[in-house]
Every structure is written in C-alpha cells, then in structure tokens.
Image: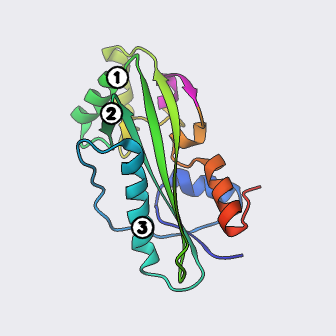
Amino acid sequence: MNNIVLASTSPRRIELLEKFNLNPIVMKPNIVEKTSIGDRVEEASMALAFEKARYIYNKLSGNEIIMAFDTLVAYNGQLLGKPQNEVDAINMLELLSGKKHIVVTGLSIMKAGTNIKIIDFEKTYVKFRKLDNRIIENYIKTGEYKDKAGAYGIQGIGGALIEGINGCYFNVVGLPLYRLDILLDKHFDIRLI
C-alpha cells in the first residue's frame, strides 16, 4: 500500500485514521490559516485543506498519498474558526446558543509525484441547545474549546451542548469518514473498510 501522509497533527484525526489501520505518517503543514470576510464556508474550508496538502506535497516526491482537512463553523454566513482567546470562545458560544449552524470540512487528497489532486467538502447541520451563562462558563473552564472551530468539540464534553445534528457526525469531529472513504476508493483504490 502507498504511504499515507496526514497533513495535520490533530489527535482526533490521527486516532480515527488509526482505527482503520491507515497509520498515517504525520506531517505538520506550516501555513497561515486565513479566511476573509465574505468567503463562503465551503470554499474557505476547501482552500485551506488544499493549502495544507500542497505544502506537504511540495516536500515529497515518492508515491505518498497526502490527506489534508480543514473544519470551519458558520452561522448566517459568518465564519467561526478557532477562537483566539477565552473571550472570543465565549462570544462564539453565545452566538451559537439555541441556534442551528453548519460545520464544513474541506478535504484535499494528493498523490506525491503526480498531478492527482482531489478537493471536496462535507457539510453537517448542528443545533445547539440554549446555553445559559453558567453552562458557557463551565464549558470554558474545561479548556476544551481551544483549537476547535466554533469553540466546541462534539466528541468531548461539548457533546452536551448539542441538541441534534443532521449529517455526518465525524465531519463535526473533523474527519468526514464517509466522504473520505468514497474519495479514497474512487481515486486511489483504497478503502477504509
């Protein structure tokens, strides 16, 4: 099998890929994750995933398959990336409280030494329960919000903030398994199962 390179140091993504015996080589892409006001969440997430994959692609020359992902949260067209600090996280949670938002993960898969470059995305709708100040304060104290788009992690304590989802759960975690499996099978003859 080709070597799988994950252009991410996300423990959640590494753990999920290891469950499917992919055991990726982990390489951190050194890019500045920038979005602009007015960017559509789908385009922004795919562009960031592509930049991450391209950064690693330019460092390799074998037959490695490079996978990169970028997960963004959006509410009413407003992109919510990773919070800059505690106040930013509180503002995001207050904004999402009691409302439905979307989570989009851009995927980029490239094969080193070739022109094969795949870009796609997965979208999931998430509904937050109504959050009072005490719930927000308690969640912030856990520190789980750090380095998470939208200031929450569904796979952890943040799962208690969620009233419901429509779409791929693993997309909200940051690795849309269904979409990834389809793309790997179609373009690289690799299956998760």
Q: Label 1 sits on what residue type? A: Ile
Magenta stretch holds residue 180:
no
Q: Earlier in the sequence, mark 1 or mark 2?
A: 2
Here the colouring is rainbow
- Quarter of the picture holding the C terminus: bottom right
User: In the displayed structure, would residue 24 be above or below residue 43?
Assistant: below
Q: Residues within 10 Å of mark 2 (few under 14, many from 20)?
A: some
Q: Where is residue 4 in the image (x, y as percent from the top left)?
A: 60, 70
First reached walking from the N terminus: tag 3 or tag 1 = 3
Please report the residue visible at 48 percent of the width from the left and 22 percent of the height from the top.
Answer: 127
Amino acid identity at mark 2: Gly
Task: Give the label on residue 77, or none.
Answer: 2
Which residue is painted at 41% across and 14% down in the image?
130
What is the x, y in percent for residue 164?
Answer: 55, 22
**Of residues 137 and 76, the one drawn nearer to the viewer in this rendering:** 76
Task: Judge from the rendering whether residue 127 lies leftward or rightward of residue 31; answer left or right.
Answer: right
Q: What element carries label 3?
A: loop
The answer to whether residue 159 is magenta is: yes
Using the image, determine if residue 97 lies above or below residue 33.
Answer: above
Which residue is denoted by mark 3 in the rendering?
28
Tell me the residue that label 1 is attached to: 136
Q: Which of marks 1 and 2 is in front?
A: 2
3 or 1: mark nearer the eye: 3
Can residue 137 be seen here? The reply is: no
| Residue 50 percent across, percent down from the top left | 42, 62
